[in-house]
Image (cartoon, grey):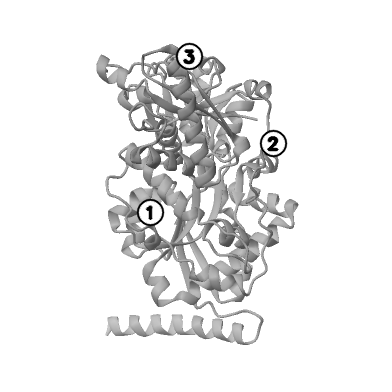
Amino acid sequence: MFIVIVIFALLAYFGKNLWTEKKQTDTSDAQQITKTLKWAGDSYLGYAYLQSVEMKKQLARKGLSLKFDDDQGNYEDRLKKFSDGTYDFIVLPINSYLEHGMKHNFPGVIVAAICESKGADAIVGFPDIFPNNKINDLNNSDLIIYYTTKSPSSFLLDLTISDFDLTVLQTDNSWRRELSGSGEVYKKAKEATKDRSVGDAFVMWEPDVSKAINKLGMKKLWGSDKFSGYIIDVFVFHRDVVAKNPDYVLTFLKTYFRVLNYYESRPDEMVEQLSNISKIEKADVSNMVQSIQWFSLTENCMQLFDIPMAVGMNSKDGIINAIYSCSDVMHRTKSITDDIDDPFRLINSSFLEELKTTEKSGVASSGTTKVFDALTPEEWSKLPEIGTIRVEPVTFQSSTSLLDYQGEEIVDKVAMMLLNNYPDYRVAIRGHTGKGDEKANLKLSSERANVVRSRLIAVHGVDANRLLANGVGDKQPPTQKTGENIRAFYMRWARVEFVLLQD
């Protein structure tokens, strides 16, 4: 009898509440909330629009609400719960989804891109450890570098080591110092200003990057503003939601892009709203938003999902390129071991295809290609070097300047990096040969550099004004690696290097 009474009491209580709610919605402008979308992320400012007043208001008009779970950047736990069905969607960088999603057979699909880090993640440190202002200065295991494990910070380190072939850091892990968050890394940086033995370089994200530069007098050594197509945050919806309730996904995305347009047309309100959500001072928020590039509907379609907004317009598949680029880095650093056989299984562009026909969107402002003016030899000589990007040896047919099949593949891979990941740099293509006749080697190395330059232009459409080819013969041998035998060392003399130059 007691159990029966309790059950009737509960039914009466909840029935009354449901009746009251229905009566209120029937007699007002309110909509009955038919679905609460559960999602997980962290406190990254790029996700803040999802918690904004305008987002809640516009979703409520459509009968939807959001329930947020802040897991403080615990991607492993986020993917486990997402795989189990705890969340309808999650937000995270592409590389994190590749690393942790693979363990759960990729339970969701990428339906849109949120933003790209343009300086929000950076390596900062003391100016004296960067004497030549080149990335390759970091190739020193005597340095002590702090970073957050399994985060965009660790990925920034990994891609820097991989893309610039920092072999010393690859083979010797004595420099690594792992911490649990950017705030902890900042504390170590602060300690190091009083005791240099604590550390030399520190990988952080905003607002700690700005604090380290402005308050601790450190220098930005390298950051996500120096490259493209790697640190892109995305919406990943569970495959069950996409299959069973596609209207929820469409309504959510439609609302999100309208909210994005709303705030971007009201910058003062945007800063105030982001400040309230993040609990960061308005002045700091104003600076931080400069390091985040949010993607509008148009930019998602045109730049990332290869969806032209009109007949005859060119579009790009930036998300697929990002998956390949991140996968390449993670294979080299052994973050993942399996191949991404078909990246198209990880995306679903149908929602953007539908939205492009019905929604107004902000103008794509960030997809323009940089124009490179022609330079004189003297102007080329004055450009500062950023670093030598990583490539496998570019191979030629014996004693000739003709690329062999493997050499063509390597040049094609370099072209993808130059176009997708480092599009704003000029490139010096330097040919090297093994030991031999000085005059003949100089001629051969110059011919090889020009053959590579010609392939980049003719096959891949790289702007000719970006590229300078020259040969140096055998006068600039590579640095001998620790433990490398002399034969292997000599084998690496004949090579082609690609040096990034800053305008």
Q: Position of residue 212 (x, y in %)?
A: 57, 27
User: Which quadrant would the C terminus be assigned to in this image?
Assistant: top right
Mark 1, secondary structure of its residue: helix
Q: Amino acid at mark 1?
A: Arg
Q: Is residue 482 above or below residue 412?
A: above
Q: Are marks 2 and 1 in contact (CB under 8 Å)?
A: no
User: Which quadrant would the N terminus be assigned to in this image?
Assistant: bottom left
State how far apart marks 2 and 3 are (Cα): 43 Å
Q: Is residue 404 above or below residue 143?
A: below
- Compared across the picture, whether 5 is left or right of 316 comes to left
Residue closer to the observer: 28 or 359: 359
Q: Position of residue 227 (x, y in %)?
A: 54, 39
Q: Identify the residue at horizontal 35%, vertical 58% (top origin).
A: 342
User: Which callout, 2 or 1, points to the residue nearer the camera?
Assistant: 2
From the image, tell me which residue sits under label 3: 196
Q: Position of residue 106 (x, y in %)?
A: 33, 59
Q: Identify the residue at horizontal 55%, vertical 17% (top origin).
A: 132
From the image, tell me which residue sits under label 1: 78
